Amino acid sequence: MILSDLLGSPVLTADGERVGQVVDARLALDGPPDGFMVRTRVYGLVVSPHAHRSFAGYERTGVDAPALIARFLSWRARGSVLVLWTDLASFTDDVVRLRPGARLYSPRLEHSGP
Amino acid sequence: MRNDRELPAPPPVAGRVLDADLELLDRQILDPDGVPISAVDDLELSTPADLARLDPEHPPVVQALLTGPILMTRIFGGRLPESRFIRIPWSIVTRVGTVVSVGAAADSLDASWTERWMRDHVISRIPGGRHDPE
Amino acid sequence: MTPYEVFFYSSGAIEEKWTPKDLKQSRLNVLVGFPLGAILSLSIVACSAIVLLPKGIGVASLFETALPVAQAFGKIGLIIAILGFVAVTFGAALEVTLSSGYALSQFFGWPWGKFRRPAAASRFHVVMILSLLAAIGILFTGVDPVQLTEFSVVFSAIALPLTYLPILIVANDPGYMGDQVNGKVTNFFGLVFLGIVLLASIAAIPLMIISGAGA
């Protein structure tokens, strides 16, 4: 499948409650060597409750300048979460469904690194 | 309203973490000599065996960068079928920074065939087309 | 910061392989050159208003704006002014042609640059050839070049924030700038100018309609 199949898809909890739409896929480069790189897997999905895609990712990168723009764009993307691949139950009919008891994590990149 | 500060940090990863839309999509791809090849238009991921019952032990794996005629779908919406894309295998990517570097020369890749076509059928028919600048 | 200027200037910096030393000269260029251009533009407006307006002379072509210069400095002044016009319009044509090549090539990710021979940047050169042909074709339709320039300047003003904002954001991105990210003072002025540019963008079309596009 391709990435755009995932982007924009609605994400629902096991109870059918809407979490938001997929705005990004977080990839982990922690596999065995694959050519020049390592095997890269989908680690999780960044989900936003808003209808628009993230612009420049201020809510995740921790860049805080220029102040007004950073604050405005972070506010626009407020409520974004990270869900792990292990918490995904199904991806059918363009809808991502979470497992019961799925946890919502902070989408900030500094929390995900090694 | 969920407050970002209340959300827990996810389990750590023993390697680099990349957000695909933020750091891969729309980035320039360069060959080892710095020659542009194309932009990253999409990513090819391995398809899980059973989409209705996703296996937590087998997440999709990045297989290739994709480049294709996405201009119209970007402007007007819709999705390009996978067959319309040209693949650049993930295994030849050497570095992901502000640009994506690959290890194969531009001319050896399918992804630059329109450039070669334009060169062979248009520019080389114009006098001086193959001359070096100044 | 109009789109064509941004693409031309930044691509030119790569074409000429700028180093940090070249930035100093570029800063001089910007701090002296652009205000000079603005003063010249205002002078043309002022001279036309003082000399031509009382006499009811309308300006229908670029060279007629040199009439006040002819009146003040005679033939020599006129020749210098006309040489200036030719240099400026020729330079602008070169800039815009290159810029159209840069903008499209960089958007799609094609090889680009005059430092590459045409065979090594085929689509870039084809875009420039087609732009030139299209421009010549437009002129042959007999459209008034002054009117056309006015329209395109207005639309550049409308598009200004679209190039300004990304540059302001990238100037603050440590991934691109390393430790050369903007300081707080630069960001303050950057945001102030963003506000001005947004105002100009919003006001551009209403102003054009109100002033009758210089008719």
Image (tube, rainbow, N blue to C red):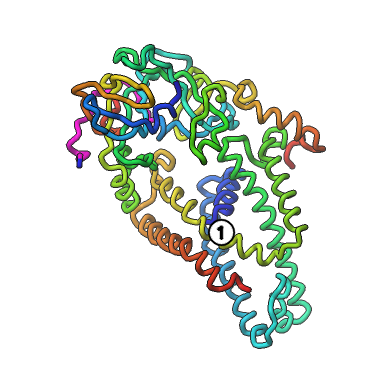
Highlighted range, magenta: B2-19
- Which residue is at the far bottom? C54
Residue A3 falls in image quadrant? top left
Please give the name of the residue rendered at 46% of the width and 49% of the height, measured from the top-left corner: C167
Task: Give the SS element for disc 1.
Answer: helix
- The quarter of the displayed image where residue C42 is located: bottom right
Dot 1 surroundings within 10 Å: few (below 14), some, or many (20 or more)?
A: some
Q: Is residue B105 left or right of residue B133?
A: left
Q: Is residue B17 magenta?
A: yes
Q: Nearer the viewer, residue B13 or C131?
A: C131
Pointer 1 indicates a residue of which chain?
A: C
Q: Nearer the viewer, residue C40 or B53?
A: B53
As drawn, A59 above or below B113: below
Q: Quadrant of residue B54?
A: top left
> Pointer 1: what residue?
C155
Question: Residue A114 location in percent, x, y?
Answer: 29, 25
Task: Report the magenta stretch's main SS.
Answer: loop
Residue name at image x 51 percent, y 40 percent: B76
- Above-or-below relation of C115 to C134: above
> Which residue is found at the position 46% from the left and 55% from the top?
C161
**In the image, what residue occupies the spot 71% across and 36% down?**
C117
Tell me which amino acid carries mark 1: Phe
